[in-house]
Amino acid sequence: MFTIKEHNVIGLDIGDFTLRLVCIEKYGKKFSVVSQGELPLPQGCINDGEIQKPDQLTHAIQQLVSSSNGKKIRTDKVISVLPDTKTFIKLLKIESESIEKLPEHLIQEMTRHIPYSMDEIYFDWQMSGEFQKNAKNDVLAGAAPIQIVDSYMGVIKSAGLLPIALEIEAAPLARSLFSLHRQNNSSARIIIDFGATRTSLIVYDQNTIQFCMSLPVSGNDITRKISEKLDLDLKKAEQAKILCGLDKKKCKGILKTILMGNVSILMRKVEEAIFFYEEQNGKTGIIKEILLCGGGAYLMDLDTILYEKFHIPVKLGDPMTNISKIGNSIRLDKNNILSYATAIGLALRGSE
């Protein structure tokens, strides 16, 4: 999951409700987005990260590849993503007498952290730094259930494409939001990926992912809450969410009052993550910044409320951090770019 490098690939983000793709070309040391597109999925096609209707998903992938904006896609190579609710990724400290025996010790440690037996998962790992004999080595470990991985691989292959890697979602997110020049990424930061059906929190420090956790709130949860409380259909509730958000001056502050329950849950989980990481790492683990991405990041005044709670700078992430140019006919702008963070990160992996 972590070591393949390919050029001219499709970065394919498969979500519960939407497919997104990005293709990137590298010119010298600069990256340019040359193809892009998105397509809503039929209802029930994917549920909580599990593929329910593989034939419909296959057709949707084919349709998206053939109808994307920008340059015509001529490659069949794909790097895609696994749902974060079904995966595990964490920086583990592993002691070993030799590099050859490190995987054995890693497996022993992983069994303490994942809710699966080792024969039920695929796993991969990479060193963070040089190996040190009989010392605590930082090892980034990732794991996913075999059933989930095989189902995603199978659908991509059925679409006539070649899956060369499947990544755990935290990896492409971090790649798109942080500079590929690693010396700029040394301070501890939190990414909150606020999606339609799920939200994840990633702690990123010392140029690597430290750990990832799922949060019990999502954009659709918020929309449903508005719908129930104000007796609106889901479409009008979504519009109200976009127009008013958490701004106390809009909609007479009604939406803020309704949604603070959801936001309080979010803040409590963020607080737990900050406390855990800073307690484990002391002064070197102080969180310096919170980055928001995903479609839910646009929720009005969310950044302000988080700042008032934690007194840590909060801002929208920038998936264009490593991108120098956007090609003709590419439809990426401030209104949708955060939803493309994962697809951009996947495509960057294929172009590094």
Image (cartoon, grey):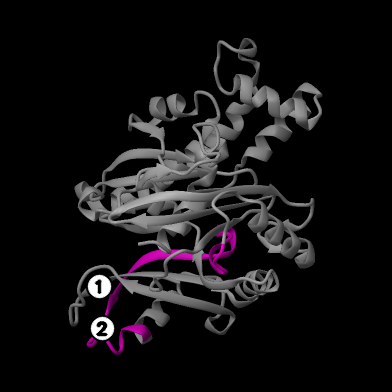
Q: Residue at x 67, y 39 (%)?
A: 221
Q: Amino acid at mark 2?
A: Ser
The residue tagged 2 is: 96
Q: Which mark is residue 296?
A: none
Q: Is residue 337 left or right of residue 154?
A: left
Q: Amino acid at mark 1?
A: Asn
Spot occupied by residue 173 in the image (x, y as percentages of width and height): 44, 52
Find the distance from the CA under tag 1 to the CA under tag 2.
8 Å
Q: Is residue 129 left or right of residue 154?
A: left
Q: Are marks 1 and 2 in contact (CB under 8 Å)?
A: yes
Q: Nearer the viewer, residue 36 or 310?
A: 36
Residue 41 visible from this viewpoint: yes
321 over 152 or under it: above or below: above
Q: How many marks?
A: 2
* Magenta-highlighted residues: 74-103
Q: Quadrant of residue 27?
A: bottom left
Q: Is residue 243 left or right of residue 280?
A: right
Q: Residue at x 36, y 58 (%)?
A: 209
The residue tagged 1 is: 137
